[in-house]
Amino acid sequence: MLMRLLKQYLRPYNAWLLITIVLQLLGTIASLYLPNLNADIVDDGIARGDTGYILREGGWMLLISLAQIACSVAATYYGSRIAMSLGRDMRGAIFRRVSEFSGREVARFGAPSLITRDTNDVQQVQTLVAMTATMMITAPIMCVGGIIMAIHEDVGLSWLMGVSVPLLAVVVGAIIQRMVPQFRLMQTRLDNVNRVLREQLSGIRVVRAFVREPVETQRFAVANVELTDTALRAGRLMALMFPAVLLLLNASSAAVMWFGGLRVDTGQMQIGALTAYLVYLAQILMSVMMATFMLMMIPRAAVCADRIGEVLDTVSSVAPPAHPVRSLVSRAHLELRDVSFQYPGAADPVLRNISLRLSAGRTLALIGSTGAGKTTLLSLIPRLFDATQGAVLVDGVDVRELDPDLLWQRIGLVPQRPYLFSGTVGSNLRYGNPQASDAELWEALEVAQARDFVTAMPGGLEAPIAQGGTNVSGGQRQRLSIARALVRKPEIYLFDESFSALDLGTDARLRAALRPVTRDAAVVLVAQRVSTIRDADQIGVLDGGTLVGLGRHAELLQSCPTYAEIVHSQLSAEEAA
């Protein structure tokens, strides 16, 4: 998976990658040539007392060193550009893929895991690319070139490299084999820490209200300790690698000094050549150490790439049609034909054989006990989920055949949990229509009974809204969410428990203000309050995922025991009548 991702996302930067390789090649060649010049200075300059020769060769060494520095700086620059661009592209790809997911896929991965994959996991792959551009390209060139140059200096000591390099490779391979499972486990433990922390931050009020701080602190401590222990195990293996490399490097240097000294003593080798050989051996083993450092990063990056690939390879269960319908003739017509829905792996369906019709200017209210399937039924209309049986039709066309943009243009959704984005009141309302004027926003706020509190806020439409709308009350969030849907001016309104946080007076005023605005639209309303739905043109009663009643308030009181029970639990006999 790692190689597949790299091939895919590095392809636009092949030119930069080629420049980086050429620069690293030139810089490494310059680095390999320096010990040879130094050997010549020792053997032909210092040994003979030729100062002119020393200055000439030293000048060449200085120029080559400057060229090496320039190549290294330029290669690092281009390598960093490649890595940062790759990280940007991968984060964008993950974000676009997740934005296509239905609720089923989001629930499967979980928000904390998706956040970790789009941030930490991408960063690991990005870091690998950056280090590859600066170190991994250099390492094989340095290793091969060092071996060639070392043999050129003296063939008799080459057996030392034949022993030290394979031995180092065996030691590194054994350590890395133990590291891979630890890195894989560490990413899972990191997901768990993110999940626990996210839950505690989101539910901080509940935690404090029930005095559960010690329990939640202990819960976080357990997740934190698990991550720490896994990281320590991986860290110990990483810490073992560098001493092993340095031990072999120093042992090899000592062996070169010993056996090289004997060859110098017998006249088979010059001192300058021995000095150069020591440098080349150090360069060879340092290149192996650089490769070792990269090999430590590859296992974790490979694990992260697998997790990234899992997201990118997941196809949404709500797939766009191959040949979408891009225009509709009728307006504001909604129909459900024998719709059933079952979650994957569930023993029983959530909805069974639901059939409903709704036309423009009509209001359909859905009521039922908790878990009856009201929100699930509402979610099938904008294709947050797809029906497992039957069909949902908007303006006579199955929603699975409609262009997704066209479908959403026709729908204004106010979800059960109203969510506001960080920004201002105006920026949140313009999610419904980016081109809406201030006058249209104030009109929507007036209908949603939100004008008074928005006017009282410092800045009015420019008043700041915190992430999630945490700086306004639950009722204010609901009214702003309703105003956001009104700004869109859709043909079908979907209100999912959108009045639950409002007092009865505000609820009544809001519904009265909505009637003229939604006069030409179809309205689907989910509510638990009988007072909210009693005036609807049709009331659908759900019980256990089945439509057990459909009609007006007075009809259902006589014909549907489930509805009568709900009504009498909330209203007196006089109010119900």
Image: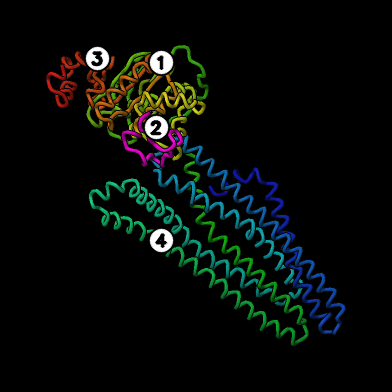
State the SS at label 2: helix
Q: Where does the image place residue 399, in percent across and percent down from the top left?
A: 43, 22
Nearer-N-terminus badge (3/1): 1
- What is the CA distance from the residue labelled 3 to the residue labelled 2? 41 Å
Would you name the residue on which mark 1 appears?
A: 332
Which quarter of the rendered picture does the C terminus lie within?
A: top left
In the rendered structure, are the residues bearing label 3 and label 2 in contact, judged by CB atoms less than 8 Å apart?
A: no
Q: Are marks 1 and 2 in contact (CB under 8 Å)?
A: no
Residue 465, horizontal then vertical, whole percent: 42, 39
Amino acid residing under circle 3: Gly
* Discs 3/2, front: 2
Residue 455 badge: 2
- Residue 316 seen: no
Is residue 564 at least partly visible in the picture? Answer: yes
Span highlighted in magenta in the image: 451-476
Pick the front one: 453 or 440: 453
Q: Is residue 105 above or below residue 4?
A: above
**What is the C-alpha distance between the residues marked 1 and 2?**
33 Å
Tell me the element at label 4.
Answer: helix
For marks 4 and 2, the one nearer the N-term is: 4
Q: Which residue is depicted at the point 36% across and 51% down?
A: 197
Residue tagged 4: 230
> In the figure, 473 relative to 248: above or below?
above
Residue named by callout 3: 551
Was residue 413 drawn as part of the magenta stretch in this picture? no
Q: Amino acid at mark 2?
A: Thr
Q: CA distance from mark 3 to mark 1?
A: 20 Å
